[in-house]
Image: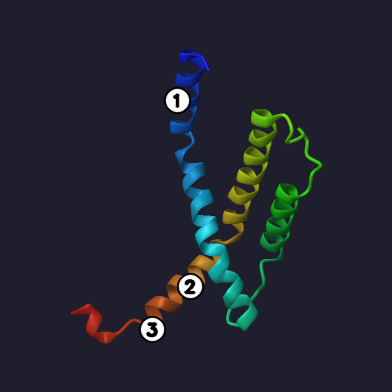
Amino acid sequence: MTPLSTWWLLRRLKTRVWAVRRIGRALKTFVPMTRDVLRGDFRPVPWSAFGMTAFALAYLIMPFDLIPDFLLIIGLVDDVIIVGWLLNRIDLRLVDYRAWKYASVDTYASPHSAS
């Protein structure tokens, strides 16, 4: 990689920090949300988030991609881009769950914690 392209890539990543944070937040939120849905604690079920997660996992597992994985660097980059985009979209679908979760945490907060 030339220094110019490295510099361009780093500059591009700095402008996309919000997307990386959103992806991380989606990953941390999805598992607890699934647990709450299965227990019946959280409704309505965000079916679109489950569908996109299934698609992202299938895209990673399936050998058929837009760009084949045997083209090492380029093949893996397309997986990262597509799965990252899907995780970004999933995070948008989890807004209601986060609001519900934080509201339930506030409701059950101990009266001793507000001293």
Mark 2 or mark 1, which is nearer the start of the sequence? Answer: 1
Relative height, residue 82 to residue 92 (above, below) = above
Tag 3–tag 1 contact (CB < 8 Å): no
The kind of residue on which mark 1 rests is: Arg
Q: Nearer the viewer, residue 82 or 16?
A: 82
Colour setup of the view: rainbow
**x, y (%) of residue 42?**
59, 77
Q: Residue at x 51, y 72 (%)?
A: 100
- Could you say where residue 84 lies in the image, as x and y percent from the top left? 60, 44
The earlier-in-sequence mark between 2 and 3 is 2
| Left or right: 109, with 67 as reference point | left
Residue shown at 57%/70% (left/top)?
A: 33
SS of the residue under disc 3: loop
- Please determine whether, in this image, residue 82 is positioned above or below residue 70: below
- Mark 1 lies on residue: 11
Q: Which residue is mark 2?
A: 101
For the C terminus, give its image quadrant: bottom left
> Gap in Å between the C-alphas at discs 2 and 3?
11 Å
- Mark 3 lies on residue: 108
Identity of the amino acid at label 3?
Tyr
Is residue 76 positioned above or below 47 on the image?
Answer: above
Residue sitting at 71 percent across and 65 percent down?
47
Taking the image as shown, residue 24 lies to the left or right of residue 57, namely left
